[in-house]
Amino acid sequence: MNTLRFAWALCSTALQESASRRVAFLLQASFMALNNVLFFSTWWLLFARFDEIRGYRLPDMLALFGISAAGFGLGVALCGGALDLARAIADGELDALLAQPKSVLLRAVASRSQASGWGDLVSGCVMLWLSGYDHYAAMALAVLLSVVGFVASWAALSSAAFWVGRMDGVIRPLIDFVITFTTYPPTLFGFRLKLVLFTLLPAGIIAYLPVELIRDPGLHTLLPAVGAVAAYALFASWLFGRGLRRYESGSRFGVMG
Amino acid sequence: MTALALTFEPSRAKYWAVALIALRHRSQARAALPLRALFYVLLLLIFSRIWSAVVPNAGDYVWYLAVADWVTLVQPRLFESIQRDVRSGDLACLLGRPISYLGSKLAEAFGELIPNIVVLGLVGALTAYTLAGGLPREPVGLFAALLLGLLASVLWQLANALIGLSSFWLDDCTPLYWLWQKAAFVLGGLFVPLALYPGWLQTLAGWSPFSAMIAGPASMVLRFDLELFVLLVAKLGASIVLAWHLLQFTYRRALRAIEVGGG
């Protein structure tokens, strides 16, 4: 309970910091929402010509893209530091967090907020609404699972920096791969690629399982979705903890906000 | 400082030197290009699956996508580099050098562009050949696509520089880039050929420079038409001249904005 309260305090501080620059905040959020609408228009054009693509129709695509956009958006709005974690590890920027009583991972990821994330969240929610699926509790849970999945995947991939050092030039594109894959129907991929998408680049855990929860709500979709995200989040936390033991100080003097 | 804006001399050897340094720097950043190439292969794989699910002979579409994605993926993010200089204050030091800031930034971008064009071009051609099961319907169109792609890259970088210069006034020009990029994707027919768009959108795309930048080179592999090729060269050429003058004008205004601010 204490950890949850602490996480909420961190998030709200990051949000206040982000919203304090109002013009930049509004500009980034609105342009990102417009950006998503423009990007999704490709799918609208495709589905205007073809009713179905490998079992996916326009409402399914809207639900998948909506989950991905909303999950990513809320993830970077609440835990914006996660995207920059690999560089922070390699640069020795965790020094200031090590002496603190709370979780280093939580502090590292929740200490920053990206304003554009709110644009993603809003456009994602609009797409979910447009999808026509009407199980709103399932939608809310699916977005929540996607947020946890995204942040866990960024933490897990970034933890590689504990072992390999400065690799943010590699880790960031891998993170982008995950984001990209969450916006394409899983039915396009064969078994081998799906294996990668449920392990190394966990787009399947972040988006494909949660979207099934919306398409076909029930215990048979709820249990795999919750189980996979919980297991992956625990794995990411464990990996970060193992990596932290190898962490080498950047000998930095600084104050964490 | 205003005088510096007016002394951009593209013929000077120093700009070639900057481009060469950027090219060497790019070849030393070993992970970046292979990862971009991997992303390119994955995109082609995904869209070849999509097209093979909806049309009987998807080979032509794969080649279309290979060229369209090649044009967009080879582009360095020049606006980020300019924005970084403006935000960090490095610009103050860079403006004092005996070389035009804008010219050196463009030279740097073109230096990065060359290895991208070569490597991703080869990767794209090999992947498309494998996925499509052979050469495109009009193999001669590949040469036309290459030339149009080079012109499109020049225009893309000039537009990128313009977006980068907007950071003199905006806190963050990245959202502007997102919009420009996505407009290019949609109006350029990146994932779906323009011929499949509804009429009104085809007209809108035709009026924008994006159709000549992306769909133009890509359509050459579907059907090579000399008349269309010449028209596209003229359209891209005119857009480059227009963008160049707009860039010079904006650059002068940007430098004046610094003087007013006392920077």
Image: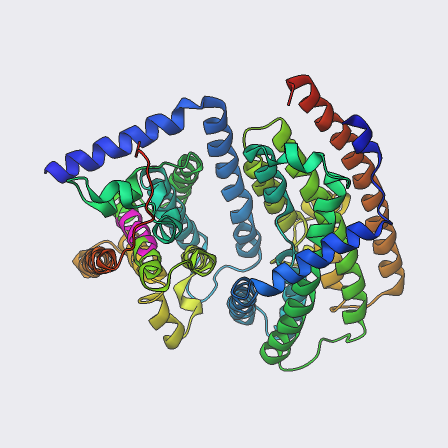
**In the image, what residue occupies the spot 49% across and 33% down?**
A28
Q: Does residue B110 appear to the left or right of A153 in the view shown?
A: right
Q: What residue range appears in magenta?
A: A145-154
Vertical placement of residue A60 versus A29, above or below = below
Whole-percent x, y for residue A175 in the image: 41, 56
Q: Does residue B235 appear to the left or right of B201 in the view shown?
A: right
Judging depth in this view, the residue of B84 and B150 nearest the camera is B84
Q: Quadrant of the N terminus of chain B?
A: top right
Q: Quadrant of the C terminus of chain B?
A: top right
Residue A18 seen by the camera: yes
**In the image, what residue occupies the spot 31% across and 67% down?**
A199
Whole-percent x, y for residue A210 in the image: 29, 54
Residue B195 seen by the camera: no
Judging depth in this view, the residue of B22 and B137 nearest the camera is B22
Whole-percent x, y for residue B107 in the image: 74, 50
Determine which quarter of the picture holds residue A57: bottom left
| In magenta stretch: residue A149 | yes
Whole-percent x, y for residue A36 in the image: 50, 43
Q: Does residue A132 appear to the left or right of B9 in the view shown?
A: left
| In magenta stretch: residue B202 | no
Vertical placement of residue B88 versus B130, above or below = above
**Magenta portion: prevailing SS class:** helix
Determine which quarter of the picture holds residue B159: top right
Vertical placement of residue B163 versus B1, above or below = below
Q: Does residue B151 appear to the left or right of A72 in the view shown?
A: right
Q: How many marks?
A: 0
